[in-house]
Amino acid sequence: MESRFNRHADRLAERHGDRVWRLGVDAGFSCPHRSGGRGRGGCAFCSPEAGLATYQHEGARLVEDLDEQIGRAVAFARRRYGAKLFFLYFQAYSCTNLPPAELRRVYDRAIALVGREAPGELRGMVVSTRPDCFDAEKAAVLASYAASGLEVWLELGLQSSCDATLARINRGHGAGAYAAAVALAGEAGLRRAAHVILGLPGEGRREMLNTVRFVGDCGAEGIKFHDLRLARGSALERAYPAGEFAPLHPSRLPGLLADCLEFLPPQVEVMRLAADFLPGAALDVFPPPEKNRLYRAVEAELARRGARQGSGAERGLS
């Protein structure tokens, strides 16, 4: 059955002829908002540790060696999913947080390692970062990989378009930084995706829908929705027992996501609908949504409304 929203996985399969699987790695980047001269304590929602996939953990140990990480990721994807095509996903922390020449060395090494483990099977790369950790020189580095034939995505953490919310969660930049980074990446010919968190302190439906409209207005090819989870060790986990905010109940997610999708331009590819945490990595005030069940519930809610992604503008909703 055709989906009522534009699923990223489906579009990748169309572009590359088969399913494409991400190889999530920690390539040794840091976050300028947490360390160094710009360090301001990090975002209130952020875990002290990178949220890498289970295959990058060996018991309680997080695998650090990049060579080992890529070998484990390829082996896991092949064993679990029969994967044949891959994107290299620079996932942990701010993955443009180096001078351009050093960035190229890190990216080149990782690409070479994937080439050794999976010859001819790398189709793209995804770089996750902060919008205030990106400039024209870094855009040019990424553009060179797109010119070589890889599908290159830049994932930018927006979280909210409301500057008051961004200040409240100690994000360290305003919505204008995101708009500027998206424009710069677009000029370089990169595909761009926004990370958006639903349920941030002080936000209601209006603020969340305004963020989705902002993503569409700025121009982006992809979006990742995350429901707010209280990561262990984060400032929000510490604030919750004091009653400083009320987390979003998972039962609200299908309707809220359907609202968001109705206002999202139909060409934007939806990469995820909910956060993904390792067991025990978050304080689960409520049982977290099961991913496949949530996807079905969102599809059902859109069907109930007779709606689909982008149809809100057509129906005159506000």
Image (cartoon, rainbow, N blue to C red):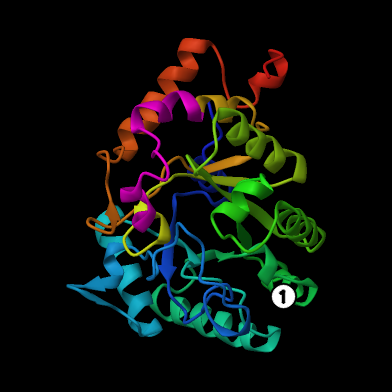
Q: Is residue 93 positioned above or below 241 on the image? A: below
Which quadrant would residue 128 be assigned to in this image? Answer: bottom right
Horizontally, residue 313 falls left or right of residue 296, namely right
Judge whether residue 239 is colored magenta. Answer: yes
**In the image: residue 34, left or right of residue 237:** right
Residue extending furthest toward the front: 242
Q: Position of residue 189 (x, y in %)?
A: 76, 60
Seen in the picture, residue 276 relative to 303 is either above or below; the reply is below
Q: What residue appears at the point 32 percent right and 54 percent down from the top-left corner? A: 277
**What kind of element bears circle 1?**
helix
Q: Seen in the image, is 81 located left or right of residue 302? A: left
Name the residue rendered at 51%, 78% in the picture.
30
The residue beneath circle 1 is 138
Q: Quadrant of residue 307?
A: top right
User: For this rendering, which residue is in front, 164 or 268?
Assistant: 164
Identified by mark 1, the residue type is Lys
- Mark 1: give few (<14), some (14-19) or many (20+) Cα within 10 Å: many
| Residues drawn in magenta | 237-257
Q: Eyeballing the image, is 215 above or below 26?
A: above
| Image quarter (top left, top right, bottom left or bottom right) of the C terminus | top right
Magenta span contains residue 144: no
Residue at point 70% right, 83% down?
100
In the shown orientation, is residue 75 left or right of residue 152? Answer: left
* Foreground of the two, 311 or 181: 181
Q: Main secondary structure of the magenta part?
A: helix
Q: Quadrant of residue 204?
A: top right
Asked if residue 214 can be seen in this view, the reply is yes
